[in-house]
Amino acid sequence: MLFILLLLSTIISAQEYNKIVIDEKSEKLMLIGYTTREAFQDSSFSWWFNSGYDNYSLNKDTLDQLIPEILRYDITIVMGTWCSDSRYEVPKFYKILDSAGYPAKKIKVINVGRGMKDITGEVKNLNIEFVPTFIFSENGMEKGRIVETPKGILEGDIRQIIIKRETVY
């Protein structure tokens, strides 16, 4: 009996990843809820993700200033695959993280619908107004975020957060 209860609680608490739904406004596919990077390889998303990733030229000088400090942080990305800013900034962000040797297991991606709602319920506690929002946390405490678009270059805004501990809006 105990085994059955443990099994049921595991099934109930398991998160669904990479859920695809239809965006009612555009009638195109969009991701909703927790998402792994692999979801961006679906043909509905790979056209913008792969080209954005491949075409981004890193600022090596600024990137070098991020390592190894960026490894202290956990990162949450709240985005919408329907959002042009998310489609533009998220692939660049991943390229920066990959170049810094940042571990994929420390990235949490939550996709929201147009009303900034997700199926996890987690986003309502994150005070998300615009996407994408990149949240940097250390020991469970938020240290800074980049909201929608960077002020300058993305690497520079990340540097502001991890070195100077400033939120960038």
Image (spheres, grey):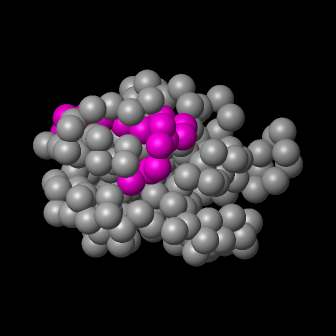
* Res. 1 visible in picture: no
**Residue 134 point in image, percent of width and height:** 42, 43
Q: Nearer the viewer, residue 87 or 166?
A: 166
**In the rendered view, does 29 fall on the left or right side of 73?**
right
The relative height of residue 26 versus residue 114 in the rendered view (above or below) is below
The relative height of residue 53 versus residue 159 in the rendered view (above or below) is below
Q: Quadrant of residue 142?
A: top left
Image: magenta residue range: 140-155
Q: Quadrant of residue 162?
A: top left
Residue at 54% across, 62% down: 91
Q: Residue furthest front?
A: 61
Q: Quadrant of residue 144?
A: top left
Quarter of the C terminus within the rendering: top left
Residue at 37% across, 48% down: 156
The relative height of residue 158 versus residue 140 in the rendered view (above or below) is below
Does the stretch in magenta take in 149? yes
Residue at 54% across, 26% down: 129
Q: Nearer the viewer, residue 60 or 82?
A: 60
**Residue 105 point in image, percent of width and height:** 30, 65
**Residue 148 point in image, percent of width and height:** 54, 37
**Residue 33 point in image, percent of width and height:** 53, 48
**In the rendered view, does 152 fall on the left or right side of 64?**
right
Residue at 23% across, 59% down: 65
The relative height of residue 156 versus residue 49 in the rendered view (above or below) is above
Q: Nearer the viewer, residue 167 or 19?
A: 167
**In the rendered view, does 44 fall on the left or right side of 40?**
right
Does the stretch in magenta take in 26? no
* Res. 139 visible in picture: yes
